[in-house]
């Protein structure tokens, strides 16, 4: 196990998975942010439209990554216990 990875243990099925520190502590962008950027790209012109579109896709990608990492890969539950790098999770 790498020292920078967080360990998550599902409270329902006991599945364990590792998550890089950057993703484990990442916050999802607000839905209003994503929608506003999408609307802005509709009304922009030329290079500005391209830039807004790219920013909107980046926010959507970040939002999807955060939401998928918040679920157990085994059972899909969002109930888990997270341990920081270096903390010893209980042995099973």
Image (cartoon, helix red, strand yellow):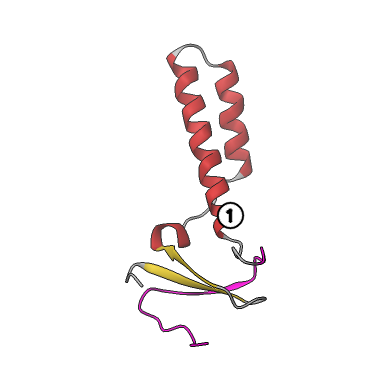
Q: Seen in the image, is 63 located left or right of residue 85?
A: right
Where does residue 86 sit, x and y in percent of width and height? Answer: 35, 78
Where does residue 25 sit, x and y in percent of width and height? Answer: 46, 61
Q: Is residue 53 above or below residue 7?
A: above
Res. 77 image quadrant: bottom right
Where does residue 14 sit, x and y in percent of width and height? Answer: 60, 78
Q: Is residue 35 above or below residue 12?
A: above
Res. 68 image quadrant: bottom right
Callout 1: helix, strand or loop?
helix
- Start-end of magenta stretch: 75-92
Where does residue 87 sit, x and y in percent of width and height? Answer: 40, 81
Query: Would residue 86 be counted in the magenta stretch?
Result: yes
Q: Seen in the image, is 77 located left or right of residue 8?
A: right
Task: Locate the N terminus by quadrant.
Answer: bottom left
Residue hosting label 1: 68
Residue beneath the point at 47% across and 20% down:
50
Seen from the viewer's position, the closer of residues 42 and 67 is 67
Is residue 52 among the parts visible in the rendering?
A: yes
Seen from the viewer's position, the closer of residues 21 and 90 is 90
In the displayed orientation, state which residue is furthest to the bottom: 91
Marker count (numbered): 1
Residue beneath the point at 44% across and 24% down:
51
Residue beneath the point at 59% across and 72% down:
80
């Amino acid at each position: 196990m790498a020292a920078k990875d967080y360990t998550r243990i599902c409270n329902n099925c006991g599945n364990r998975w590792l998550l890089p520190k950057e993703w484990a502590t990442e916050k999802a962008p607000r839905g209003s942010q994503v929608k506003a950027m999408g609307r802005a790209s509709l009304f922009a012109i030329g290079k500005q439209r391209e830039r807004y579109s790219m920013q909107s896709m980046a926010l959507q990608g970040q939002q999807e990554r955060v939401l998928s990492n918040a679920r157990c890969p085994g059972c899909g539950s969002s109930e888990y216990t997270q341990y920081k790098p270096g903390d010893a999770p209980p042995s099973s």
